[in-house]
Structures are given as structure tokens and as C-alpha cells.
Amino acid sequence: MLAVMPDAPSSSPPPSRPTVLLDCDPGHDDAIAIVTAARHTDLVGITTVAGNAPLERTTHNALVMRDLLGIDVPVHSGAARPLVRDPVFAVDVHGSSGLDGADLPAPTTPLDGTDAARFIAATVRSTEDVWLVPTGPLTNIALAMRIAPDIIDRVRGVSLMGGGSFGNRTATGEFNIWADPEAAHVVFDSGVDLTMAGLDVTHQFLATAERVERVRAAAGALATVLADLMVFFSAIYRERHDDGALLGGAVHDPLAVLAITHPDVFGSVRRRVDVETHGVLTRGMTVIDERLLRSRPAPNCTVLTSVDADTAFELILDAITHFTT
Ligand code: BDR
Ligand code: CA
């Protein structure tokens, strides 16, 4: 676990309602990240990537969520596979649809484009202070940085879900980073202002039975879908871990959104973080330099270490209630 020794924040406070482009692979917790971003940010676009499920499914799921929210936000699909590796999906956690566990309506609105990297680049170039919030493998973000390196200095920052001081896909590899470590390396090494919601913090934010029932009690189509999704997701987490180890699914992805909309809800440290791309046992490990040396590598990342889970849940419930009809 990370030693929690708060450093002074390196950057100025974000605006209270930041401008966000969400890059995701829905995914149960990605679906909740979409709701959270739609409520608490100026959401200028959603891009999709292969990760929890094949690209066709993650894109389908993003379109379903747009419909359920009734929002007018462009959705662009992106990379169908990692930069170098073969794609591996998280069927064991999210089911083959990426959103198993709920009856989902078919999408009624068409996709807005199929080149997420170009959409990301164009959005960053045309929009002041936009945050990129990736909640899946970092393939689209890395491709955008490759085709348009000028966006690295223009973007307000990248607040991502991924990594941590331990893994879930492997002992050291968290799924999003493990799935496309080369893309993650491009992003972590880019010099962009990074915030990392890794497993250290996301495992503090669980879909407990009580929280799921509070979502269901919000009533309406969206609340019912999200509650059903969380029941499925939490059952998988409980099955996969020792009794009592996790009291519900870890709701990872919305924390990357809340990290910029409500930074006071989190504890964090500034650290140098690099991605292992060659390790046999450590593929996709985020190597966090915890040495408190007077002379140490300059930090490239705000690493979230703690979250006030009750407050985070209330913010998400507020988002769900806002869109519930
Ligand atoms: C991450 O992997 C996916 O299963 C989740 O959507 C989340 O983004 C957690 O490791
Ligand atoms: Ca995800």
C-alpha cells in the first residue's frame, strides 16, 4: 500500500465544473463514470476503446448510456486493439456484453464518428482547458498524442483510472494499464499533467448492498439499470475474493471524474510514476517512486491515496437522481 504523506498540490485548483472528454470502455463502472461526468462536468465528448469488451460492444454500451441520460454529447469509437499486444477482454468481470446484468434498451442514436484519436486531438485544439478522462486502456489517448503532440501542452490534464501499488489482472498489473502497457507508457512519459485513480483508492469505494439499494430507490429507468448492473458487478467481486475482503464491486471509474470535479474528497501525493512494459511478472505495473530522497525524480503524477467514500457516493447518487425520470 502507498505511504500517505501529502505533498503540496503542483497545480492550481480546477474550475468547479471542468470541461471533460471521457474515453471509456463500458463496463459497469464506466457507465457510472458517464453519468457522473454528464452531471458534474461540461462533457464535450465520449470516445470508446476496446477493453472490458470488444470495441463494437463498448461503443454500443456508450450509445445506450447516452440514450438513458438523454444527453446530446458526441460519441466516437476508437481503437479496436492495443498498440502492440493482442486484445484481451474482461469477460470474467463484466460479462461478454461488457454490461451484463441489466436489460438494456437498443441504442436509438447513431455513432458520431469512428476516429477517436482525431476527435480527441481536434477537441483539445478547439477547446480551452479540456481534461481528458480515460477509464479504459490508454490506446486512444496515446494515439492522439502521437498524431497531435501539440495537445500535450494544450490539454488541462489527464485524470485516469488505472494502475496503483498492486494489481487486479495480475499481482502487479491493473487491467487498464496491463491491457495496453505501451499506450500507458506513452501517456505517463508524455509530460502531461497526470492524475491517477489507481486501485489503492478505487478499492476504498465499493458498491455495498446498502448503496445499491439507495440507487434502486431513486427509481426510474436509469436507476434500475444501474442498480441491476451493480448487483451483477458486486456479486462477481464477492465471488472472486476471500469472504469479507470486498463488500461489493470496486466502483473504479467515476473516481477519475470526481478527482477533478471534487478534489477535496481525495487525499493524494505527487510522485514519479512509470509503466513497466517489459516485465515478465510485472507487465503493466505502475512503478511509483516512493523514495523520499531529497534528490529524486521530478513527479509526473498526482497519485490518489484516499477517498471519502460516503461523500463520493452522495455525489454519484445526486448524478443518478438528476437523470432519473
Ligand atoms: C478497470 O478495469 C475495468 O474492469 C474497469 O472498468 C476499470 O476501468 C479496473 O481495473
Ligand atoms: Ca473501465
Image (spheres, grey):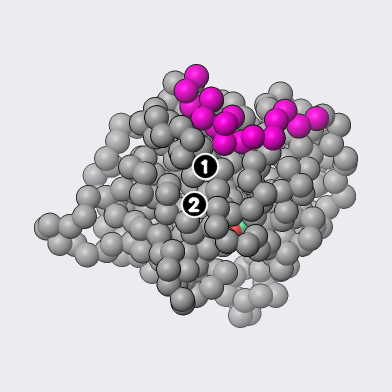
Which residue is rendered at x = 35% and y = 58% of the image? 274
Q: Amino acid at mark 2?
A: Ala
Q: How many marks?
A: 2
Label 1, ligand 2: CB separation under 8 Å: no
Does residue 207 appear left or right of residue 235 in this picture? Answer: left
Does residue 76 appear left or right of residue 172 in this picture? Answer: right
Dot 2 crowding, Cα within 10 Å, few <14, some 14–19, many 20+: many
Cβ–Cβ under 8 Å for marks 2 and 1: yes
Q: Residue furthest bottom?
A: 242
The main secondary structure of the magenta stretch is helix
Asked if residue 146 is positioned above or below residue 109 in the image, the reply reads: below
Give the residue pinned by disc 1: 143
Picture quarter with the C terminus = top right
Residue in front for this viewpoint, 83 or 124 = 83
Residue in front for this viewpoint, 83 or 119 = 83
Which residues are drawn in magenta? Answer: 110-126
Q: Which mark is residue 291?
A: none
Query: Which quadrant holds residue 46?
Result: top right
Q: Amino acid at mark 1?
A: Leu
Give the residue pinned by disc 2: 183
Which residue is rendered at x = 37% and y = 53% of the image? 303
Dot 1 crowding, Cα within 10 Å, few <14, some 14–19, many 20+: many
Element assignment for label 2: helix
Which residue is rendered at x = 49% and y = 52% of the image? 183
Residue in front for this viewpoint, 51 or 240 = 51
Residue 135 point in image, percent of width and height: 57, 48
